[in-house]
Image (tube, rainbow, N blue to C red):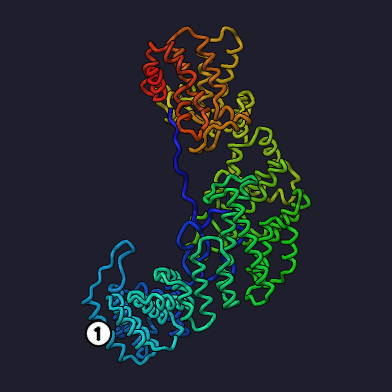
């Protein structure tokens, strides 16, 4: 007898808790610092460094040169192609001749830019590495030669923008040849004190910051990294990482800041590094710079943290079956509630001061916090005060307003459903065109739509479905779950919440029959028709109803419904009537058990056995086959799929199982044990009776409840109430020896009795 616990799936680090607050609202450029507890960074910044570089070159080249052609020329053309362009060669492929940026570079007045790109292409292998897992191999001889060449080209160039690009390459060559002092000095000499607005300037400044770090000036290094972080969104991720490596405290960095805006950015960066709910960074950033765009990101992070640590577990009590990754003890929940209240107090106080750049977003956020606290009148009042014109803020307002309206409604009736329908269709416009989560566009273009998709899914499975469940409207609950499934966004904690899961695993026969009738009935309301239109296609409700009757061991009604189902919709077994001596193995054709048994044939056989049990004397084999079939369709049996669509590896019997007729037999095997004992009583064959006793022992052992006291727990496993019978009355049978050799618990029992 084997009891196995195994690991489950790894959660999606961007979608593992219930959220209705999109991090993408007013957060462009700060994407890496949206909240997630499961990975170092949420995503890549917008724009990417490549996109920012292309934009710089487009500004340089002016009208008539396309972004696509710049990207193609810089990032795909080999050195030889760039050399031919720089030399003004006429022998160029047609595709290159058509490239607008290549045309620009080919003009005599732009040859300096072409020669620079050729030089940059030469430098790239010397200052990069193959991948993040490979240690860089620095060729200092090559870098020194490139430095001399670059310095000569730099001094000859007349174009100031191109000269700055050469300056960056020279600083980079010094930095990666570990001549950090010279790299820092080169920056000061080549760029001076006047700040530029170009990407290449900030890349060079980041190299200076890195050089200072290696020279042990960690505070100055941290300050410069904060400046690059502020001014160059495409470099924020790398600068944040480097700043954290300096280990400089923000109080050390503040004195270097030239104004309060710079101090606010330093405070924000350190706030982004805090994974725990904490309003300190919001307070500091606002005190320095109330208009800082980082405030919106910090606010979103705090809301998302509390959704993760407080709101999701709270919703889990309302009917969802989520797998949490955060502690949810009463003490921790109380602590998170205090953090929630503190965040709302801070949010409201900053709104009242009137200096926030996006005050309406903060008002909507406060309303959402009131919603989480279940103070719906306050949330409604706060929403009524918002006059947002910004589309992103208006979208978030719509979401919070919908949540408040649903929770203020005591019963979701047909009148409210009519009001709810436009909101569901509004979500359709926001999620139009998104496909399966794993087929999304990973360049960030789909991120906002997928955020709406997740919010819509969360509304359906975590809010509306449980509400209908509590109202006893299980058909509507199934329809809501069907709409949720159609979004193709079910992942991790939504597992087990789908319409198919509900139909195949949980629904009782009467509810399934009502569902079938509803789907075929005319005269549905627009709301009902909308939901029914998304109900999973290909679901054979006749088969599902038959399965639901099998769960109740009502094989007569199950047979009748299986007859209505298409033959190819019925599951097939080979070993459902074959005893299972151990808790492993699949129900496949093997040995004499090679004939397929459909669910319909199974029910017909069970009914035949029931009829035989009505006529005394009942053959022992009849009881035995009936018991074996019941065990086979239990949680532990090979043919569990006759009654369930899914069998998790971590479920087990508990006393609560006895409260439900199906769970009692599925996990407890009471009836199977009873029929095994009846089979033993009806037989005089000791070998057969020994087999019956062992199978009854297996059924009995399934009801052992885990205990804190390990010794008592093991004692219970060893002292099965059937073991004395096996070891006493049937010790001389061949089957006993077989059971003794395979069952360690039986062996431990026998050994323990010998000691006495």
- Residue at image position (51%, 79%) is 262
Residue 520 visible in the snapshot: yes
- Compared to 443, does 93 lie above or below? below
Query: Which residue reaches farthest front?
Result: 756
The quadrant of the image that shows the N terminus is: top left
Residue 53 visible in the snapshot: no
Instruction: Identify the residue under disc 1.
Output: 148
Pinpoint residue 737: horizontal percent, then vertical percent. Answer: 36, 16
Pinpoint residue 642: horizontal percent, then vertical percent. Answer: 54, 31
Query: Which residue reaches farthest right?
Result: 415
Task: Answer with left or right where residue 501 lies relative to residue 589.
Answer: right
Instruction: Between residue 29 and residue 498, name the one nearer to us.
Output: 29
Task: Answer with left or right where residue 279 lies relative to residue 4.
Answer: right
Q: Report the number of discs.
A: 1
Q: Residues within 10 Å of mark 1 (few under 14, many from 20)?
A: few
Pinpoint residue 140: horizontal percent, then vertical percent. Answer: 23, 75
Q: Secondary structure at mark 1?
A: helix
- Compared to 389, does 635 lie above or below? above
The quadrant of the image that shows the C terminus is: top left
Pinpoint residue 44: horizontal percent, then vertical percent. Answer: 46, 66
Query: Which residue reaches farthest left?
Result: 141
- Compared to 370, does 196 lie above or below? below
- Residue at image position (61%, 40%) is 502
- Compared to 5, does 487 lie above or below? below
Which quadrant of the structure image shows residue 91? bottom left
């Amino acid at each position: 007898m084997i009891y196995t616990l195994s690991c489950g799936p790894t959660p999606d680090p961007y979608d593992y808790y219930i959220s209705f607050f999109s991090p993408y609202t007013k957060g462009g450029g700060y994407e890496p610092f949206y909240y997630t507890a499961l990975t170092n960074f949420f995503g890549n910044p917008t724009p990417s460094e490549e996109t920012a570089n292309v934009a710089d070159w487009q500004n340089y080249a002016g009208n008539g040169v396309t972004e696509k052609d710049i990207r193609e020329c810089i990032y795909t053309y080999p050195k030889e192609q760039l050399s031919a362009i720089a030399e003004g060669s006429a022998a160029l492929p047609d595709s290159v001749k058509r490239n607008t940026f290549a045309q620009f570079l080919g003009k005599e007045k732009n040859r300096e830019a072409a020669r620079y790109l050729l030089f940059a292409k030469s430098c790239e292998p010397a200052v990069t590495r193959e991948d993040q897992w490979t240690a860089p191999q620095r060729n200092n001889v090559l870098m020194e030669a490139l430095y001399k060449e670059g310095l000569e080209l730099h001094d000859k160039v007349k174009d100031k923008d191109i000269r700055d690009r050469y300056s960056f390459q020279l600083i980079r060559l010094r930095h990666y040849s570990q001549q950090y002092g010279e790299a820092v000095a080169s920056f000061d000499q080549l760029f001076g004190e006047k700040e530029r607005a170009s990407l290449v300037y900030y890349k060079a400044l980041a190299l200076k910051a890195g050089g200072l770090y290696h020279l042990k000036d960690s505070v100055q290094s941290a300050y410069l990294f904060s400046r690059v972080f502020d001014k160059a969104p495409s470099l924020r991720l790398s600068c944040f990482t480097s700043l954290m490596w300096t280990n400089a405290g923000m109080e050390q960095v503040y004195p270097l800041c030239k104004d309060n805006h710079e101090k606010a950015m330093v405070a924000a960066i350190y706030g982004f590094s805090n994974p725990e709910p904490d309003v300190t960074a919001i307070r500091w950033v606002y005190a320095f710079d109330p208009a800082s765009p980082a405030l919106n990101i910090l606010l979103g992070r705090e809301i998302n943290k509390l959704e993760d640590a407080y709101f999701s577990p709270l919703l889990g009590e309302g009917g969802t079956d989520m797998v949490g990754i955060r502690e949810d003890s009463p003490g921790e929940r109380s602590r998170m509630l205090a953090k929630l209240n503190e965040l709302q107090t801070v949010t409201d106080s900053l709104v009242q001061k009137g200096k926030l750049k996006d005050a309406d977003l903060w008002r909507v956020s406060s309303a959402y916090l009131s919603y989480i606290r279940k103070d719906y009148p306050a949330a409604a009042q706060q929403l009524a005060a918002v006059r947002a014109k910004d589309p992103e803020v208006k979208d978030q307002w719509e979401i919070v307003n919908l949540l408040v309206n649903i929770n203020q409604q005591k019963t979701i009736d047909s009148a409210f459903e009519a009001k709810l329908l436009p909101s569901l269709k509004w979500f359709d416009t926001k999620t139009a065109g998104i496909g399966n989560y794993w087929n999304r566009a990973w360049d960030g273009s789909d991120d906002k739509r997928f955020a709406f998709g997740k919010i819509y899914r969360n509304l359906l499975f975590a809010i509306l479905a449980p509400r209908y469940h509590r109202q006893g409207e299980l058909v509507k609950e199934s329809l809501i779950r069907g709409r949720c499934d159609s979004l193709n966004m079910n992942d991790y904690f939504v597992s087990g919440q789908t319409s198919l899961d509900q139909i195949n695993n949980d629904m009782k026969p009467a509810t399934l029959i009502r569902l079938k009738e509803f789907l075929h009935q005319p005269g549905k309301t627009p709301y009902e028709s909308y939901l029914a239109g998304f109900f999973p296609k290909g679901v054979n409700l006749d088969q599902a109803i038959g399965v639901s009757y099998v769960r109740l061991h009502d094989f007569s009604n199950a047979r009748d419904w299986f007859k209505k189902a298409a033959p190819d919709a019925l599951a097939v077994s080979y070993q459902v009537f074959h005893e299972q001596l151990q808790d492993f193995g699949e129900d496949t054709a093997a040995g004499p058990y090679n004939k397929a048994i459909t669910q319909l044939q199974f029910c017909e056989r069970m009914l035949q056995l029931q009829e035989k049990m009505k006529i005394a004397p009942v053959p022992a084999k009849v009881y035995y086959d009936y018991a074996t079939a019941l065990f086979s369709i239990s949680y532990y049996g090979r043919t569990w799929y006759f009654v369930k669509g899914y069998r998790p590896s971590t479920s087990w019997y508990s006393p609560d199982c006895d409260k439900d007729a199906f769970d009692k037999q599925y996990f407890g095997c009471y009836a199977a044990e009873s029929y095994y004992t009846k089979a033993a009583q009806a037989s005089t064959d000791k070998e057969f009776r020994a087999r019956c006793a062992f199978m009854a022992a297996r059924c009995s052992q399934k009801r052992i409840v885990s205990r804190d006291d390990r010794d008592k727990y093991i004692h219970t496993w060893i002292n099965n109430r059937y073991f004395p019978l096996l070891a006493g009355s049937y010790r001389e049978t061949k089957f006993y020896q077989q059971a003794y050799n395979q069952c360690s618990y039986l062996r431990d029992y026998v050994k323990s009795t010998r000691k006495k």
